Image: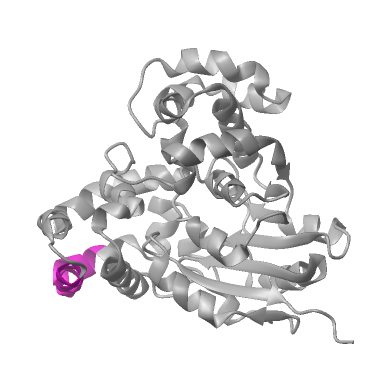
Amino acid sequence: METVTGLQYSCGNEDSASELDALDVAGRRVLSVAAAGERAFALLLGDPREVVAIDRNPAQIHLGALKVAAIRRLDRDGYLAFTGVRNGPDRAAAYRRLRDDLPDESRLYWEARPRQIAAGVHAIGRTERGIARIAPLLRFVAAADVRRLRAARSLADQQAIASDLFRRPIVRAALAAIFNPLSGRLLLRDPVYYGEARRDAPGYLRDRVVTTLTHHRFDDCFVLSLFLNGHLRDSQSLPIDLGEDAYAIVQRRLDRLTFVESCILDYLQRQPAASFDAFSLSDLGGYLTVAEFGTLLERVERAGTAGATVCIREYISSPTIRARWPAALVRRPEIESRLLETDRSVGCTFVCAAKASPAH
């Protein structure tokens, strides 16, 4: 298992509408990977009974606690400014408003990092800082094409422009230079790019970007803004939990969300059988070996109720191709195919399943 310390992710980079579609969380108890917190907040939009957001990295748990306190205390505009999604006033002053709402360990963590608070926490993770470093190169090779994509009159025109973009040798060379195991370790500093279950990143990303732009307008895909600009301040779209109406719903349902610091394998082993109704699992293939991922699936099977739903979001790593698949977790190819078209995260594919009821 890859051991990561310090804050790896600080900004949501997924279209969590896909998890809501795949999992049908209304009235259910859901286990989610915490990461930057956005996927857990988005799950609240589906009206679950409870969401448990788990991460073995304490820094991610402290980030979740900070975002929970900020959502409780700040209106949407204040939250976007405080976290750095939008430009805003003195973030230190906003932090002083919410610091007493933090658990003791999280308060100590953030008060030792005033410069990160001042910068806005959406930009401080290793992955986000790595993306900011590569953004100038992506803009250099694709600036004219981005203007053409934004001016495209139809999705068909947009698809043609995107396909032409990835046929250019300089773009292929840039992708190969950025998205490989060495730069993944040294530049992006994200295990998904060099883990055991990784796939050919440049070819995979070419296919996924073209497919996404076949179904969605460029400016509706906030992850493209993140990679091209290194931030979301100028993005015309945002993660779904940060929408104007959605933010108020998340505020009202925060008491249903708990952040837990634990290895997910150990946590599931400790849980009673049939204790969760849904599982939102993302990017674990970069942190777990293929064998460990097989163990994860076995423990998900045991901890799931009959009919429990599973959504595994995969990016560069694809452990589900090689891991042993439990018989009781029945794949749902119709949902997997649908999400390939509807998801706006640009680089993701999905493995979805439901736990079969025991035979009588």
Q: Quadrant of the N terminus?
A: bottom right
Q: Is residue 305 left or right of residue 338?
A: right
168 w.r.t. 118: above or below? below
Question: Taking the image as drawn, is residue 184 in sight?
Answer: yes
Magenta span contains residue 302? no
Q: Position of residue 335 (x, y in %)?
A: 53, 75
Q: Is residue 287 visible?
A: no
Rendering colour mode = one colour
Q: Residue 301, how many percent across, how many down?
A: 77, 72
- Return the residue nearer the eye: 151 or 206: 151
Q: Main secondary structure of the magenta part?
A: helix
Q: Can you give x and y, in whole percent of width and height, for residue 313 in the image?
A: 53, 65
In the rendered view, tell whether residue 68 sits above or below residue 38. above
Residue 265: quarter of image: bottom right
Q: Quadrant of the C terminus?
A: bottom right
The residue that appears at 44% across and 25% down in the rendered structure is 82
Position above or below: 329 against 124:
below
Seen at 55% across and 48% down, the residue is 42
Please give the name of the residue rendered at 56% of the width and 22% of the height, measured from the top-left corner: 73
Residue shown at 38%/45% (left/top)?
A: 238
64 vs 217, nearest the viewer: 217
In the shown orientation, is residue 197 left or right of residue 55?
left
- Residue 168 lies in the magenta-colored region: yes
Q: How many marks?
A: 0
Q: Residue 338 at x, y = what percent?
A: 45, 74
Rendering quarter of residue 306 = bottom right
Viewer-proximal residue, 334 or 92? Answer: 334
Q: Which residues are magenta?
A: 156-174
